[in-house]
Image (cartoon, rainbow, N blue to C red):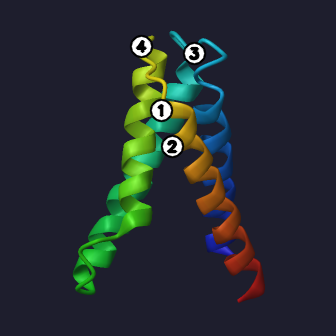
Amino acid sequence: MLLAILGVLDIIGGILLGLSGFVPYVGSGFVSAFGFILIIKGIISYISGAAKGFFLDFMGILDIIAGIMLILATWGFVIFFFPYIGILLALKGIYSVIIGVVK
């Protein structure tokens, strides 16, 4: 169930990042806080994967990158590929929700 909840966070983050090219998030405290949440989630995921000997945790790295991009979007710095990373994050969230509900 926890995996499904974290997947919902990924879906919301993916949608926010996917819309960053169209909606200006300059000065948005909510988006900035969400970016920090994704960074913390990614760091925890990467450290727990590394503790098990898995040093290429793509999902944790994607969370960290998406969190940094959301924070950059709140400063007005948006590059053309930010929405594509948002789509990847949303797909990862959908995958996590499905796996979290099935197990």
Q: Residues within 10 Å of mark 3 (few under 14, many from 20)?
A: many
Disc on the earlier residue, 2 or 3: 3
What's the CA distance linking mark 4 and mark 2? 18 Å
Quarter in which the C terminus is drawn:
bottom right
- Measure how far apart labels 3 and 1 are at the Cα level: 16 Å
Q: Which residue is mark 1?
A: 81
From the viewer's perspective, is the residue at label 2 or at label 3 nearer?
A: 2
Instruction: Find numbered disc 4 in the image and state the secondary structure of the residue it sits on.
Output: loop
Q: Nearer the viewer, residue 96 or 48?
A: 96
For this orientation, the residue located farthest to the front is 80
Dot label at residue 66 = none
Q: Where does the image place residue 33, in percent across and percent down from the top left?
A: 50, 32
Q: Quadrant of residue 13?
A: top right
Mark 2 Cα shell of 10 Å, populated few (<14), some (14-19), many (≥20) = some
Residue 57 image-quadrant placement: bottom left
Say the numbered circle drawn on residue 85.
2
- Counting residues from the start of the chain, the first of labels 4 and 2 encountered is 4
Are circles 1 and 2 on residues that touch, CB within 8 Å? yes
Residue position marked by numbered label 4 in the rendering: 75
Mark 4: amino acid: Trp
Circle 4 residues within 10 Å: few <14, some 14–19, many ≥20: some
Q: Label 4, label 3: how many angstroms apart (C-alpha)?
A: 8 Å
In the image, what residue occupies the spot 41% across and 15% down? Answer: 77
For the residues bearing labels 4 and 1, Cβ distance under 8 angstroms: no
Image location of residue 81, percent across then percent down: 48, 32
Amino acid, disc 3: Tyr
